Image: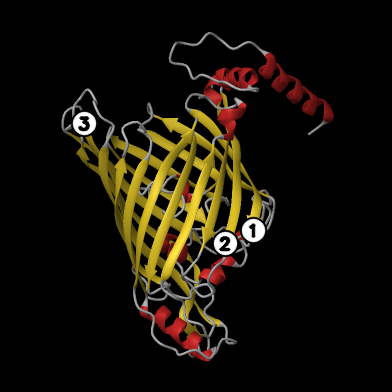
Amino acid sequence: MKLDQILAIAVAFSALLVAPAQAQDAAAPVYKGPLSKPASNLAAKGIDLHADVYNFFNSNPSFGLDLGHTGNSAYWVTGADMDLEKMLGWKGTKVHFKETFFNLVENNDYIAGQFGDSAIGYQTTYIQRDSQLSQLTLEQSLFNGKVNIEAGRTHPFFYFTPMTCETFNTCYQDTLYYDAGYISPLFSVWGGRVKVNLTDDSYFQVGMFSNDSGWHFHSGWDWGREIPDGVLNLAEYGFNTAYGPGGAYTGKYALTGYYNSGDHLNNNVTTGGRSRGRFPDDPARTESGTGGIVFNSTQIVWREDGGSATYTSPRTLSFYTGAGYSFDTTVPVEADLYAGFNLHAPLKSRPNDKLGFKLRYEKMNDSFNDFLSEANATAGGSGAPFDDKVIFELNAHIDLFNGMILEPVAQYIVNPNSYYNPYTADRPQDGMYLGGTLKVPLGKYAGISPQ
């Protein structure tokens, strides 16, 4: 791009910042803060800015392989959504951009090995750089919104298997991250999805996303790398329910199937047919392709006002589930199941707060449990078998002030494993995990995002 072209773009963007916003109706979003005037001008022209900070804290006071450690990491998620219909007249076309910055990182590289287990607490992102491209996509809506297509640098987390347990810290499905090939949602891969809204309350969508085994070493902007070794394919059917006066008892349900065509390492077989646990220097056998299913749901089951159409009380009780199952015995996780309750507005004076309880059960494949037991014996441990694990969780969603949210979590785990540190003579202990997430709506405070 030539210098005169760069200057022309800069001048045009500056004009957007200082140009007066068009008259807006009473329902238009309200911007407050030091950058509210240029941000509202940009929004009127089709550019919506956003910035949020997520700080994750983790500790293992009494569980795991090495007790009494803490970890912390903060993710600054920034970006913009550009409506090209407003900007250029391209009907139904948008561009989405996210860049994540990392700081306040403490003990991030070692805490997984200290915890050991594959399911407890928050599974930390392997951070190797200061920032990461999280999303750069082109979205196109067709047929009055009946069909939606989005593709570019992205992640399946943005579209598939909707999160139901409402806590950032511990709401994830292990069959996706350990079996299907999900990477951290903050790291983008090439991919996209096509969604068809079958009715106002149901949809079907399919997506394809590239495998990137070296994702944590790349910025997301280095697009000239080698061709990925496979593709993660997903298909999902979802629907909403609404019954009672005015649709008071709402629910969401989604069934997702996945197939990853790429290669993965066998749980406990080397290229020579020997045990990986007993012969750690032997390379693992490579397997091709793996698949499974995930079912997520959430449903309001009780309302204090009895479902009144006038919404006389915010206090409700919702029940949610998550269930993942792998069809493949050569991947680590066979099944990951959880269910829980959320009590919304436990105090009527605090309608945005929630209290929750979750029970989680996870079964590793027998071949992976054999690997962990034999690896433990090789390191000088007892080699005792690893049983299925159960996790009891209490959590909360606390509205601090003006959109700042704290989500503390306490878990007790029975039968943890040593997934992240298999060749150790120590055995992971049952015990407590304590953690939390602090979300700060930085864009709202700065005035670049609406109130």
Residue 253, given in percent of the width and then of the height, sits at 28, 46
Q: Disc 1 on helix, strand or loop? A: strand
Q: Nearer the viewer, residue 134 or 154?
A: 134
Q: Residue at x 36, y 80 (%)?
A: 366
Asked whether disc 1 touches disc 3, contact meaning CB atoms under 8 Å apart, the reply is no
Kind of residue at disc 2: Thr
Residue 202, given in percent of the width and then of the height, sits at 28, 39
Q: Disc 2 on helix, strand or loop? A: strand
Mark 2 or mark 3, whichever is nearer to me: 2
Q: Does 123 sit left or right of 18 as displayed?
A: left
Name the residue at the top extreme. Answer: 23
Q: Distance between the residues labelled 2 and 3?
A: 44 Å
Q: Residue at x 60, y 59 (%)?
A: 215
Among numbered discs 1 and 3, the one appearing first in the sequence: 1
The residue indicated by pointer 2 is 70
Mark 1 or mark 2, whichever is nearer to me: 2
The residue indicated by pointer 1 is 106
Q: How far apart are marks 1 and 2 (CA)?
A: 8 Å
Mark 1 or mark 3, whichever is nearer to me: 1
Mark 2: few, some, or many residues within 10 Å (few <14, many ≥20)?
Answer: some
Residue 334, given in percent of the width and then of the height, sits at 35, 70
Q: Disc 3 on helix, strand or loop? A: loop
Q: Nearer the viewer, residue 173 or 254?
A: 173
The residue indicated by pointer 3 is 247
Among numbered discs 2 and 3, the one appearing first in the sequence: 2
